[in-house]
Image: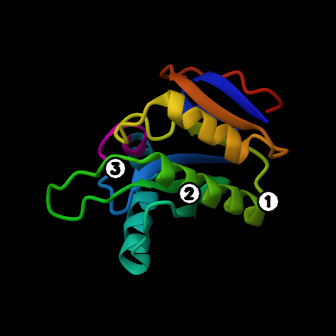
Amino acid sequence: MIYEVEGDILLTSAQAIAHGIAANDPMNQGLALSLHEQYPSMHKDFHHWCHQAHPKTGEAWIWGGAGGVRVINLITQEGGYGTGAHPGKATEADVNHALRALKKIISKEKLTSIALPRLATGVGGLNWDKVKPLIESQLGELDIPIYVYTSFVSGQKADEVGS
């Protein structure tokens, strides 16, 4: 069940936050920066995983931190691999594959709720009108709450139905 909400995704009651990123992303913009600042070990572990696994777009990696925190990094765009290199733009196909990977993680980990932003519409450069149907197609029939943060309001907890 997908619920569109407004608020600060970092204040979610959902069991995990999923967000779009590039492999080896410096996490210096948008939600990735906020997650990097809040969970510095996640950033370090993500880069270690990237160096070990050499992930391709469309893959996903889940990180678990202290207190049961979980962040799912969806590889929605090409990586920036050189010094000062920036992540590339996302594609609808890569977002769709990453959402499939997310669906598998939800099942495998038996997650009970997920929060995600307007995936790949910031740094990824995609139009929300193209991404929203992908989320609905891949996650809409899941029997857990999927909170899509359509508007960011700093410091405001969203009204998450059922949380």
Q: CA distance from mark 2 to mark 1?
A: 20 Å
Secondary structure at numbered mark 2: helix
Is 79 included in the stretch rendered in magenta?
Answer: no
On screen, residue 114 versus residue 73, left or right, reads: right
Residue closest to the eye, 122 or 100: 100
Taking 156 as reference, is 53 above or below it?
Answer: below
Comparing marks 3 and 2, which lies closer to the viewer?
A: 2
Taking 16 as reference, is 83 above or below it?
Answer: below
Q: Amino acid at mark 3?
A: Met
Taking 136 as reference, is 94 above or below it?
Answer: below
**Among the two numbered marks 3 and 2 on one chain, the one whose residue lies closer to the N terminus:** 3
> What residue sits right under mark 3 in the picture?
27
On screen, residue 17 versus residue 40, left or right, reads: right
> What residue sits right under mark 1 in the picture?
110
Secondary structure at numbered mark 1: loop
Looking at the image, which residue is at 40% across and 80% down?
52
Taking 21 as reference, is 110 above or below it?
Answer: below
User: Pointer 3: residues within 10 angstroms few (<14), some, or many (20+)?
Assistant: some
User: Which residues make up the magenta segment?
Assistant: 28-33
Comparing marks 2 and 1, which lies closer to the viewer?
A: 2
**Among the two numbered marks 2 and 1 on one chain, the one whose residue lies closer to the N terminus:** 2
Q: Amino acid at mark 2?
A: His
> What residue sits right under mark 2 in the picture?
97
**Among the two numbered marks 3 and 1 on one chain, the one whose residue lies closer to the N terminus:** 3
Secondary structure at numbered mark 3: loop
Its colouring scheme is: rainbow
